[in-house]
Amino acid sequence: MPNKVLCSHCHLEFDSSAMIKDGNLNFCCNGCQGVYHLLKDQGLESFYEKSKNTALAPPPQSYLDSASFDTESFRDTFVKVNSDGFNEVSLIIKGIHCSACVWLNEKALSKMDGVVEANINFTNNKATIVWADDVVKLSKIIDMIRAIGYDAFAYDAMTQEQYVNKERKEYYLKMAVAIFASMNIMWIAVAQYAGYFSGIAQDVKTILNIAEWILSTPVLFYSGWVFFRGAYYGLKANTVNMDLLVATGALLTYFYSIYITIMQRGEAYFDSVSMIITFVLIGKFLEVLSKKSASDTLDMITKNIPSEVKIVKDGVISLCKLDDVQVGDTVLISSGERVLLDGKVIKGQGSFDESSLTGESNPVYKSVGMSVVSGTTSIDADIHFMATKDFKHSTLSNIVTLLESAINKKPKIQQMANRLSEHFSSVILLLALITFLGWWFWPNSFETSFMVGISVIIIACPCALALATPVATLVGLSISASRGILFKEAAGLETMAGIDTLVLDKTGTITIGKPEVIRESIRKEFDRKLLYSLVESSKHPISNGVSKYIKAQLEDKEEIVFDEYTQVPAKGIEAKYKGMKLLGGNLKLLKKNGIDVDYSAEETAFYFVIDNELVAIYELKDKIKDGIEELMANMQKNKIEVILLSGDHKNITRSIANEVGIKSFLYEQTPQDKAEYINKLHSDGKKVVMVGDGVNDILALASADIAIAMGGGSDIAVEVGDVVLLDDSLKSLNEAFKISQTTFTLIKQNLLISLVYNAVTIPLAMAGYIIPLFAAISMSLSSLLVVGNSMRIRYKWSSR
Amino acid sequence: MDNWVIIMMLGVSIFLGAIALFAFLWAIKNGQFDDEEKFLNAAKYDGEEDLNDAVAQEQKKKDLKKNYKPE
């Protein structure tokens, strides 16, 4: 029984014989040993106490040279100079497992000379480092991070992200002030209402009024500033918006109450002022919280493009800024790297993953003389290629430009509440004016008429209207989040309910994307291990399907080592074992070897040949995900047209479409074709939901009204999507539709409640029947009705 | 009951509340709630040593600022 021990640094378990002994300590590798001693020397060993037994990743053995962090091009892109004149950079720290890791990084960096500030966010692993460049270089700081077993990447702390954070912080501050003041005013108001019924001395009342006056002033002018600003910009654009109603209502009430306080008679309404501002501010904050900005997505996409490439000049390999590469330069690509420029292979060979451009998952083989396209990824190829275009004219750059314009042009359907509030605000302001004039000309004192006019505005409490949409969408968001459906933007819920066309991608969206063997035809018995070993080494999806099928039949899963093994691109595999010649692949491979086949396959077929004799045929098919029937039924019920877009061939696409029951389908679509098709649907006046998972879908996703991405899909697709289905299932897709419809109904109900409410109370206010108590109660009551109604829906869904 | 009692009690209680409010506003502005995880963990790693480190860091920043001449 081997003796297992824990590594003293990373806490991973290994066999004791494999460990490096160091006194009574055990290390799994030199890296861990190095880090342990470094921490000890630095006096940071309490890290182990803090991290408890959290398993860490052992530090990588080698890194790229950190000197690139000091280059001019790096400085231009990532380093900022802050107001004190220090340098500042934003990094993503890789390898953070626990809060002790954050502590360790911050401590280790702060201890360095010249580091002014090191701040790491535990939630997103982003770090801000401020340093004095004449004392320490950034490369030394990066070396330190690496020396303690982590790694760092620079990222552009986009101004957008900072702006959003700043805006959010601003709202926190404003809400804190508003809520504090409103709560205090409520206590004082209790005394005032008690006094209203049981009698109160005028001088006590004045004292209470003054206290409320003091408290409501910061609420109106500090917290409520957003409404004045919003009203101003609205007026500038010639629209009457909700902000204007809130601002005028609150301001008029405020001045009227000051007048009352000074004249020492009547009732002041400072409580209404602060309540309106507080409620509506909270509603606005909820909207800010659930907003996604388009530029974030763009940053994510450009962030994925490295800024430098390796070029060979006079036999020397050097890093060159992407924009500086000229036509004719020799660019070096190693396996696993992304091709960033278009060019022609001049040395080396290997296969490339072109799925981001074509949607085809099969690797494409490239050798000298063939062209490579930017945006593709080298799978196993180490090549030199000559750039035939500079970056600005490359395919990748074109796609990014297309994507940018698609995201920026993304149609925004105006929210119902906004449309409604425009009319609502104008009508109320007009009614208030009419009421005031009516009362004044119907001989009444200016004071009375003014008060009645204002009471119309107060009673037409915009709280309920302002809360109607945010509360409803919040309910929708929380229901969907609990079911693994992430709506990135609250407005998406409302938009999705008004959709009339659903466009589906095929592979990975309605099919699982992994072909499975559905038919087996054995012509002659053979050793299954031969076939298993043959297909196991290939990464092709068809081979994977066969391998999975054979694996289930085998007991002994050890692989045979072949004497010879070659993958023939787009055809199959050839191998030699103990004098036997093995072939496994498609019809083309068999034809190439002069073997006739008397078998007509209905689906994709895999043929296995031993010594020129066909021994087995496997037919594979991509399975359709569960839940498609319910989805189709729901779509039919809601009269939503379903369209299938696929990069695949006609026959396969048609067979899937027929099986599912989709009438319209398009095949052999390139990413650009897909996006154009969506745009064509738009120009026909359709509102489109696009569902996809791959890089080849992103252009189409960005063009659609609502983009739904499968959580298991590519990172960029998830980033571009407005909605992410975490479990990739069609059931979630169906639920997303249902939830959006429920939310939309809820929004309509809420708006109706607040409108009906206003329709009842406004005439009363116009007639002058509103007493202060009623005004105050009605204020909260309408909001409560809206919130209560939303909770009712939430409860109904969660008990399902 | 005299009016000044009401005035005093209102004044004192609002003043005390305002102190708490301003402390809270300062903390928000200072970025203490920016990272909720870290904010909760900070309590775990609190100690004399960490307090000393924080002071040393402040001092270092001040010194660097004095001597630092950005090119």
Image (cartoon, coloured by chain):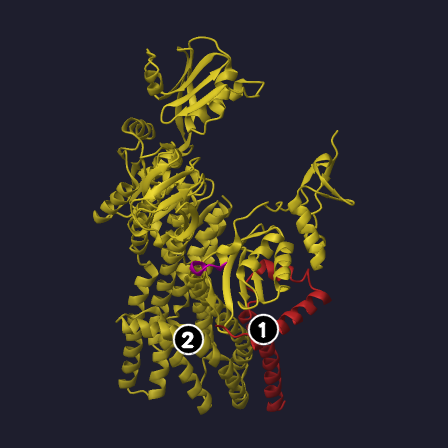
Chain colours: A yellow, B red
The residue shown at (42%, 88%) is A259
Q: Is A317 situated left or right of A34 in this image?
A: left
Which of the 4 image quarters holds residue A714? top left
Q: Give the range drawn in magenta.
A: A70-74
Residue that lies at the very extreme toward the right in this rendered image: A24
Residue A124, magenta (yes or no) = no
Dot 2 falls on which chain? A
- Residue B69 appears in the figure: yes
Name the residue tied to disc 1.
Answer: B64
Label 1 packing within 10 angstroms: few (<14), some (14-19), many (20+): some
Residue A71, magenta (yes or no) = yes
Q: Where is residue A757 in the image (x, y as percent from the top left)?
A: 38, 65
Label 2 packing within 10 angstroms: few (<14), some (14-19), many (20+): some
The kind of residue tagged 2 is Trp
Q: Position of residue A158 (x, y in %)?
A: 43, 61
Name the residue tied to disc 2.
Answer: A225
Per the picture, the main secondary structure of the magenta-coloured stretch is helix
The residue shown at (31%, 74%) is A429
Dot 1 falls on which chain? B
Q: Marks 2/1: CA distance?
A: 39 Å
- Residue A602 appears in the figure: no
Residue that lies at the very extreme toward the left in this rendered image: A684
- Disc 1 is placed on an element classified as helix
**Residue A395 or A470: which is nearer the viewer?**
A395
